Image (cartoon, helix red, strand yellow):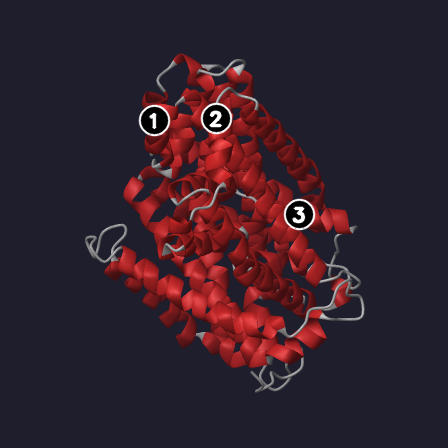
Amino acid sequence: MTERSVSFFTSRFGMFVAMLGMAVGTGNIWRFPRVAASNGGGSFLVAWVVFLLLWSVPLVMVEFAMGKKARSGPVAAFGKLVGRRYTWMGAWVAWTAIAIMFYYAVVTGWTIRYVWGALIGELGAQDPATVWESFAYSPWVVFFQALALGLAVFVVARGVRGIEAATKVLIPSLFVLVVVLAIRAVTLPGAGAGLNFLFTPTLEGLTDANVWLQALTQNAWDTGAGWGLILTYAVYLRKQEDTALNAFMLGFGNNTVSLLAGIMVICTVFSIMPDAASQIVGASNEGLTFIWVPQLFAQMPAGRFFMILFFVALFFAAWSSLISMVELATRVLQDAGVARGRALMLILLAGFALGAPSALNEGMFLNQDFVWGVGLMVSGLFFAIAVLKYGVRRFRETLINHEYSDIRIGAWFDIVIHLVVLEAIVLVVWWFLQVRGENIWGPFGVANMALQFALALGIFLLFNRRIARASGVTEDAPALEPASTEA
């Protein structure tokens, strides 16, 4: 793909809101408050910020640089920058994001259903647990899954300009909604206790290895770093766009939304149901969002209004992230020579068919969420290895610190990339150990996850040459400079 054949974001603002829409998802709004509250509050925040700088921002830089240079999706980008032999790594990155897309459409469908429930007053009139139990994994979920996929495909069908136009509305609106909800939360009686809990670190928490591992995991799951989504959007960056400054802006912008969501949920819990705080924050993502949140808003003055705002914000976050996943899948097929229109139709059909089992079966949903969530950590590892193969210093000096750079990155980046490799390995091993007591073939089973990993990796390694050839990566005439042996 040549630069002339690529459409570009029209402005830095348009690029930034599209990237932020990719990064900000349900994990920011429903997972972050729960994990922060369950892992020491202020102590977790300290570790979370540290890993923002030691995991998220470096990987965001890598994705920005690779996508902008290669002008291709993850599969071809790995082959072009690192060498044809490593195209399989890009295939893993792409597949992991696409596998998440299948069930993430289900999650997006849930948010649509709950926007409707909040609008008609159903969530305040009925027991939220009953509403959730009657809806979850029923045939109605398939309908809302299809609707969510259709909305994402509708935006992506209009190309990068359509994505930019949609996110220019979605992301500022999402930010305003989250700010309004956070302000409302901190003005509730007793909210100060929630703020103290969230922002007060303890020595016990800071010395707890589990807190640090949970903070690293949250960074891996909620910033979009290492997913391949940033790389895909970076294909549409203008030549003069900076890499490093945009990476810092995206990382801190994403985590700002997470922090506001944490303030919103935790302060509301401490104000409305302080006696049940531990039970609420210990619930699952779905339990916290679809069962406890409606109960919290039902007891708040003007609660129905703020409940509507909450679920609209959650839908905007989910929709904007789903758009980026559909775009990644589209880009991969386009790189393989499939016309964009046909690629979108294939994605719509495959997304519906392969996501339907997760829509109808809780075990399948939990399994896919777990397996490919851990798979993202392997993706982060592969991005770091790609930089090592290319040559860390050469990568930094030629692809990050270019003539249009607003800020320049020093040699600390070289050290951190090696550290990312260690972090990724530790995370994957830790998650395997976390589930060692489970039924090995169950949704969280070690054998179950290992088998799915092995099947995917085996296929990509076996067909590496064909994948590379289909993506336009040739051994004799690489699109970019050959990879350096410098590490």
Q: In the depicted view, which residue is nearer to us: 258 or 315?
A: 258
Mark 3 and mark 1 lie on one chain; the one further toward the N terminus is: 3
**Mark 3, mark 2: which one is toward the viewer?**
2
What SS does tag 1 mark?
Answer: helix
**Quadrant location of the C terminus in the rendered image:** bottom right
Label 3 with label 1: CB-CB less than 8 Å: no
Q: Disc 3 marks which amino acid?
A: Ala
Disc 1: which residue: 276
Which amino acid type corresponds to the residue marked 1 in the rendered image?
Ala
Find residue 113 and report its horizontal and vertical position in percent.
46, 27
- Number of marks present in the image shown: 3
Residue hosting label 3: 18
Residue 349 in sight in this render: no
Q: Secondary structure at mark 3?
A: helix
Residue at coordinates 67% horizontally, 82% vertically from top-left? 481
Residue 406, can we see it?
yes
Image coordinates of residue 269 in percent, x first then y, are: 43, 27
In the rendered structure, which amino acid carries the disc numbered 2? Answer: Thr
